[in-house]
Structures are given as structure tokens and as C-alpha cells.
Image (cartoon, rainbow, N blue to C red):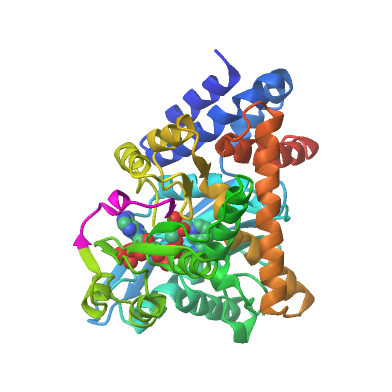
Amino acid sequence: MSYVSEVMERVVAKNPGEAEFHQAVKEVLDSLALVIDAHEEEFRKSGLLERLTEPERIVSFRVPWVDDKGAVQVNKGYRVQFNSAIGPYKGGLRFHPSVNQSILKFLGFEQVFKNSLTGLPIGGGKGGSDFDPKGKSDREVMAFCQSFMTELCKYIGADQDVPAGDIGVGGREIGYLYGQYKRIRGLYEGVLTGKGLTYGGSLARTQATGYGLVYITQEMLKHEGQSLAGKTVVVSGSGNVAIYATEKAQALGAKVVALSDSNGYIYDADGIKLDIVKEIKEVRRGRISEYAEKVAGSVYTEGKGIWSIACDVALPCATQNELNLEDAKVLLANGCTCVAEGANMPSTREATDYFLEKKILFMPGKAANAGGVATSALEMSQNSQRLSWTFEEVDGKLKDIMIGIYEKVSDAASRYGVAGNFVAGANIAGFEKVADAMNAQGIV
Ligand code: NDP
């Protein structure tokens, strides 16, 4: 049996019931087979893949807090510190009822390769809780965040582990988390990214994941002699990534015609009015259905189905496994020729394989959404220098990083004889740096 197959069997046996983690590891290992087979003896001897697929540490803890009715609530909290070979652990915190250890391990594993691709010195981690911020008062969110950080603060630090936001964790949550860290540890340091601008945040961090996604999409199109100008785009989700992907796509001349949330999707043939979406989502924390009540001619449809809307470019920006094989077939049948993932693993394995088989332009999340973590690393640099760069400076660096990622991914795919397969390219390019650093550091 090949080394890759042996390790995959071990991962399934040792992590029972963790379907998302198995899915992420399998996708990476399958596309690394080309590299691993060429160095099988060396990698086997150092147990490289066994170490790479086992998190360095997982902290799991109780998060008790009191709700507005005076009742005690208890949530689960986690931090998965996956790999620190190339830098301190870095990766977001997700607050969503679906959060469990499998989902955080899949996200932490992906983060290792993503962070490597940015070219910046950051290792991979992820954390979060099954807490649902939706419908909670500000006081409840603060009580939860303070309790969560009271435990988490023992395991993180500016040179150790630097969490950021993710689903359900935006500026408000980062503020409450940071305040509690500072209060307990007495340190005013860059321990979280995505901070507010008045206390160490970076300009352009809010926009970074969405903007970065569009920069790399534009780069892919450019290499085909095309551009986003005049293209019809469908974006799923209506959170941080979706909103700023829409903003940049529109700025580059694309027409974004749809957005969604977990209840349904809106279609606006004239192009989404983003100021209205921002007011609904960023200010009032409302539902996307409200858009159709405000914009004449737009249509809201309850449930899934956003991928049935015809488009040239699809940007899935909501959550994992939101786009399956059937969706992929419908998208392509309707003329879509380019898919770039703003969310982490939004396409199922079957959908990804279909895109690759049909040879459309397809950029996987670990490359396409790396602009968020890259800009978080730029926030860390500014914090340690005690400096704030301008929006243009940060945005310029973000753009260069995304173009650099495209080049690394495209080059790795070509080197291994699979030109145009950016899934393999991203996994290989991300892996090479981490594997080299792990080997140099001995059996740790
Ligand atoms: P937000 O919480 O801001 O927004 C998430 C959006 O996706 C919301 O519209 C939400 O709808 C929708 N959504 C969430 N879960 C589901 C679900 N189970 N089914 C359908 N829709 C769902 O999160 P972000 O925009 O920050 O994150 C979106 C994706 O991008 C995630 O996969 C995240 O890991 C990834 N990502 C985020 C980065 C960042 O910097 N923020 C960086 C890199 C990746 P609703 O409001 O109804 O829940």
C-alpha cells in the first residue's frame, strides 16, 4: 500500500466520526501523491505525513455564561493548534451552532497550507464555539466572549497563537475578546487580529478576504486574456467575505446579481445595491430577505438554489459543502466558466472533481481566500512595529500577495505536470514550505 493510502487509513481510524476532517485530509493527500511518491522513503522515515495530519495540540473547554433571563448557559470552546513549523499558530475563531472538533480540525488543517501559501511566517490553527451569536443581545455576546477568553487566554499570545474572526466573529466579538485578554494578562499586544482601528487594527483587514478573492479571480482571468469587467457574478453568503467580494467585483466592472444567507437568496437582475445589503447585514444584523422588500424588481427565494442562477463567475462565500455536484453541473450548464472559493471548502469533493474534469478556471479556498489571513499577518507586523500603514499600503501589499499566490499555485501545478489544476498546485506549493521546515526541525 502506498504511504499516502496508509496515512489516510490511519487518519480515518484514529479520528472516528470526523467526516469534514477526513474530507479535507483526503483532498490534500490525494493531490500530494505526486510529491510524496517522489520522496516516499525520506517522508516515511521522518513520519512526515503522520505528524502533518495530527494537530500539535487541541484545547477544549467549558464556556459558562449567564443569559438575559438570568439562566446559566454552557457552550463548548476549542482551539486547535495544528502546526507551528513556519510561525505562530494563526487562524480564525468561528461561533456557530454547527461547530465541533471535526470542523475545526478540517479548518485548522487547511489553514496550515493556506498560511504557507501567503509566504508570511504564520503557522496554522483554528478555534471557536458552538455558541450562536444570532438573536443574542450585545450584553449576552459580551458575557460569552469574556468567559471564552478567560480560558483561551492561557494558550495564546502575540508570538504563540494569534486568533482572528471567522463565521459569527466580527469586529464586535473581537473587541470583547481583546478587552478581556488585556484585562487578564495585562498585555497590550497583537494577540488577536481584526481589531478595531482605535486599538491596533489594520486598515483594509475588514475588506481583505473578499478583495483578495477578487484579485486572484481577476489574475486567473487575466491569464486567459479575460477580465471581470462585464461579467455576471453570483456570490453566496452575505457576511464579511461575500460583501467585500461583491464590492471589489463591482468596482472592477462586474455585475453581481445574487447573494444569500442560511435562509434563502436574492436575485437582482440590475445588480445588487450593496449599500442596502450593508445596512441590513452590518448595521441591523437582519436577514437577506429584507433586500427584496426594499428593492423593487428583486426577488427573494427561500431555501437553497442560488447556484441555479446563470452567471459567468461563481464565488461561494458562505460555508463548507454549500455547493454539491448537482449545483456544479447546473452552474456549468448555464455558462459559468470560473469558480473561486471565498469560503473554506464550499465545494464538495465531487463538485471539485467535476470542475477539474471540465477544466474550468477553479481556485480552491486555501489559495483564493488567503487574503484575510495575509492581511492579519500584516496587522501583526504593524502591531509589533507600533505603526499603522495607510489603506493603500495594505491593499497594495494584499494585491501583491494574491498575485504571488496565483503564481506559486500555477507554477507548482506546471512543475508536477498538472498545469491548470490549481487544487493540486495550491496543496503542493503550501506543502513544500511546511515539509521543509518540519524536516529541518527534527522529530517534533
Ligand atoms: P460571516 O459570519 O460574516 O458570514 C457568513 C455568511 O454565510 C452569512 O451570510 C451566513 O448566513 C452564511 N452561512 C453561514 N453558515 C451557513 C450555512 N450553514 N448555510 C448557509 N449559509 C450559511 O462569515 P465570513 O464571511 O467571515 O465567512 C464566510 C466563509 O469564509 C467561511 O467559510 C469562512 O471560514 C471563510 N473565510 C473567512 C475569512 C474572513 O476573513 N472572515 C477568511 C478566510 C475564509 P446566516 O447569517 O444566515 O448565518
Quarter of the rendering occupied by the C terminus = top right
* Rendered view: 145 above or below 358: below
Side of 397 relative to 206 (left or right)? right
Q: Quadrant of residue 435?
A: top right
Q: Reply yes or no: does residue 153 show up in magenta.
A: no
Quadrant for ligand 1 reads: bottom left
Q: Residue 247: x percent and y percent? A: 49, 70
Q: Which residues are magenta?
A: 301-315
Please give left or right for residue 162 compared with residue 61 in the image. Answer: right
Residue 373 occupies which quadrant of the picture? Answer: bottom right
Residue drawn where x is 70% and y is 41% of the image: 434
Determine the residue located farthest toward the bottom in the rendered image.
198
Q: Is residue 304 magenta?
A: yes
The image shows residue 9 at horizontal and vertical percentages of 47, 23
Residue drawn where x is 55% and y is 58% of the image: 213
The quarter of the rendered structure image containing the N terminus is: top right
Tell which of 90 and 367 is nearer to you: 367
Measuring from the top left, give residue 381's x and y in whole percent: 74, 69
Residue 143 seen in the current view: yes
Q: Is residue 170 above or below residue 99?
A: below
Q: How many marks?
A: 0
Q: Nearer the viewer, residue 338 or 239?
A: 338
161 horizontally vs 72: left or right: right
Instruction: Answer left or right for 235 relative to 247.
Output: left
Residue 164, can we see it? no
Question: Residue 363: image x %, image y %?
Answer: 54, 45
Up-down relation of residue 1 to residue 39 (above or below): above
Q: Residue at x 33, y 51 (%)?
A: 310
